[in-house]
Image (spheres, grey):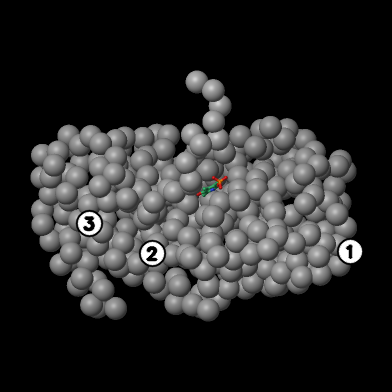
């Protein structure tokens, strides 16, 4: 039982279609970009790549914010960055919680010693702006935070009212756009968003590893007026920005090849155009819902609150959830997600994000699911393809 290098085979994951909650499929163009020569983090070539990446990020976020950069870390690092730079001990922070990611935000606020004001909604429903209005009455919270696309439930949160409440109460408006950026409209300047983060592996269709963030002018003002230093050295944007800005001062080594990947993924989005991209996500979402309902299954979220990029399908009575997902993966190389937290065992999470958001995948999902359910003796009504085709034909 000695150690033998030959025991380790060549890496070969095979093919996959990633229709879970992320990561989503990554295009060959992005994978090829990652394989380009690794240069130094202060190499003139890389500095140009950094500037272009920032310009492309401003395009997808629809912002003029100078401080728009990818944080070196996954979406959760972006979340932590957005709180750690603004929350000082004792600060009042309103966090809207209707799923796993709102819960994570609340956890971070508590860890930072902020005074958490939590506004809850049922998992699978949007946050009621009136509940937020009530929570801020007579207070002046520093931040109002919400998840735009709650990946654990499939709800897309309308942002207009919450943005207005933040403005009226003098709070910074902080939004998680991890599962919406690149799939549904995130126009941060127009929507009055002051602090925002996202992730690369959802609708940007880039591997996990970076978290794009952007801070607006009001947020920068607050950052500059901090009384205490940012408690995280790594995520301290007052320092990180001097590497991404004109000074080019070393802070930590940028993940060079990941940034190549992000640049390419963003370039693909710019080529498609934001409007066309949002329309594509909406169309495939409508087709998916039409097919799911034609099969006799139902969606977990009411129609008006559904997120186009992440669809929660209620698991029919008498179904072995794990077995269905195992069949999809083994027989169809198709990944979908199970429920998280309160929704474990109750829903499937079907992502149609970025590169994976296409008709052939939607149809593959219908076929694979029908096959897996039928094999278990769970009755499904035929007609998914016909119902979805009607949606595609009407576009
Ligand atoms: C995936 C996700 C995150 C966390 O991102 P990681 O890359 O897993 O760290 C945060 N918020 C939302 C809404 C997400 O979907």
Which of the 4 quarters of the picture holds residue 40? bottom right
Residue at 16% over, 49% down? 371
Label for residue 366? Answer: 3
User: Vertical placement of 245 versus 120: above or below?
Assistant: below
Mark 1 Cα-neighbour bin, 10 Å: few <14, some 14–19, many ≥20: few
Give the residue pinned by disc 2.
357
Q: Are marks 3 and 1 in contact (CB under 8 Å)?
A: no
Q: Which is more toward the observer, 7 or 172?
A: 7
User: Vertical placement of 338 versus 163: above or below?
Assistant: above
Residue 312, visible in the rendered structure: no
* Position of residue 108 measured from the top left corner of the image (x, y, whole percent): 65, 37
* Tag 1 secondary structure: loop
Residue at 24% over, 71% down? 391
C-alpha span from label 3 to label 1: 53 Å
Task: Report whether 394 appears left or right of 338.
Answer: left
Query: In the rendered structure, which disc, 2 or 3, sits on the residue that comes first in sequence?
Result: 2
Give the residue pinned by disc 1.
247
Residue at 37% over, 45% down? 337
Task: Report whether 191 appears left or right of 353.
Answer: right
Q: Are marks 2 and 3 in contact (CB under 8 Å)?
A: no
Task: Report whether 238 appears left or right of 56.
Answer: right
Q: Which is more toward the observer, 199 or 1?
A: 1
C-alpha span from label 2 to label 3: 14 Å
Which of the 4 quarters of the picture holds residue 89? top right
C-alpha span from label 2 to label 1: 40 Å
Label for residue 230? Answer: none
Residue 257, visible in the rendered structure: yes
Query: In the rendered structure, which disc, 2 or 1, sits on the residue that comes first in sequence?
Result: 1
* Position of residue 287 measured from the top left corner of the image (x, y, whole percent): 27, 65
């Amino acid at each position: 039982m000695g150690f033998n290098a030959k025991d380790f085979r060549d890496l070969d994951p095979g093919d996959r279609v990633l229709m879970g909650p992320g990561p989503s499929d990554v295009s060959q163009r992005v994978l090829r970009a990652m394989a380009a020569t690794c240069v130094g983090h202060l190499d003139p070539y890389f500095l140009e790549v950094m500037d272009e990446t920032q310009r492309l990020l401003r395009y997808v976020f629809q912002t003029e914010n100078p401080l728009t950069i990818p944080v070196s870390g996954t979406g959760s690092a972006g979340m932590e960055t957005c709180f750690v730079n603004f929350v000082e001990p004792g600060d009042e922070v309103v966090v809207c919680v209707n799923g796993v990611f709102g819960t994570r935000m609340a956890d971070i606020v508590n860890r930072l010693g902020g005074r958490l004001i939590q506004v809850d909604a049922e998992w699978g429903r949007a946050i009621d702006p009136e509940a937020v209005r009530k929570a801020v009455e007579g207070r002046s919270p520093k931040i109002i935070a919400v998840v735009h696309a709650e990946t654990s439930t499939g709800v897309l949160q309308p942002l207009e009212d919450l943005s207005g409440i933040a403005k009226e109460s003098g709070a910074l408006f902080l939004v998680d756009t991890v599962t919406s950026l690149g799939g549904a409209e995130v126009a941060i300047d127009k929507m009055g968003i002051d602090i925002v983060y996202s992730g690369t592996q959802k609708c940007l269709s880039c591997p996990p590893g970076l978290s794009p963030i952007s801070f607006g002018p009001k947020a920068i003002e607050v950052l500059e007026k901090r009384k205490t230093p940012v408690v995280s050295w790594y995520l301290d944007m007052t320092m990180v920005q001097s590497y991404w800005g004109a000074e080019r001062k070393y802070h930590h080594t940028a993940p060079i090849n990941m940034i190549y990947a992000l640049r390419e993924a963003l370039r693909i989005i710019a080529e498609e155009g934001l409007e066309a991209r949002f329309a594509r996500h909406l169309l495939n979402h409508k087709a998916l819902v039409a097919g799911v309902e034609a099969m006799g299954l139902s969606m977990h979220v009411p129609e008006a609150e559904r997120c186009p990029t992440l669809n929660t399908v209620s698991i029919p009575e008498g179904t072995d959830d794990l077995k269905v997902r195992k069949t999809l993966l083994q027989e169809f190389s198709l990944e979908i997600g199970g429920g998280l937290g309160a929704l474990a065992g109750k829903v499937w999470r079907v992502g149609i994000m970025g590169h994976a958001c296409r008709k052939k995948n939607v149809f593959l999902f219908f076929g694979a699911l029908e096959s897996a359910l039928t094999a278990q003796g769970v009755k499904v009504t035929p007609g998914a393809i016909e119902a979805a085709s009607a949606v595609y034909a009407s576009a």
